[in-house]
Amino acid sequence: MREQGLGVPRNRLHAYAWCLLAATDGNNDATKARDELEKGMTEKEKSAGQKLAQHRFAQQQKQESIG
């Protein structure tokens, strides 16, 4: 549902961050989506998306280590 953007506001930066995470995990569809998103993004936007992805990854690692 969220993959299709249902129930959430559109946000290219957040979409890019999620695609980065999924692409890093080997998801080919996410890799293609990431590449498409990058075409319309500035370097500043890409950098912000990468930082957001790193933050979300760190949160996930923390949650996994807790329980």
Image (spheres, helix red, strand yellow):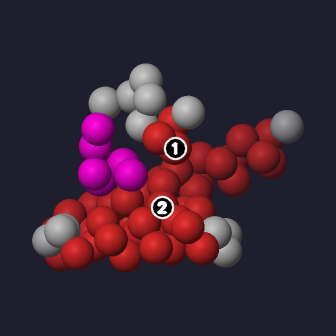
Mark 1 vs mark 2, foreground winner is: 1
x then y, percent, for residue 4:
47, 41
Location of residue 33 by image quarter: bottom left
At mark 1, the secondary structure is helix
Alpha carbon separation for disc pair 1 and 2: 10 Å
Q: Is residue 5 above or below residue 32?
A: above
Q: Amino acid at mark 1?
A: Glu
Q: Which residue is mark 2?
A: 19
Q: Amino acid at mark 2?
A: Cys
Q: Which residue is mark 1?
A: 3
Q: Is residue 58 left or right of residue 50?
A: right
Quadrant the N terminus occupies: top right
Q: Is residue 62 above or below residue 7?
A: below
Counting other residues with Cα less than 10 Å from the Cα at mark 2, is it few (<14), some (14-19), or many (20 or more)?
many
Residue depicted at x 51% and y 36%: 2
Q: Which range is magenta?
A: 10-15
Location of residue 23 by image quarter: bottom right
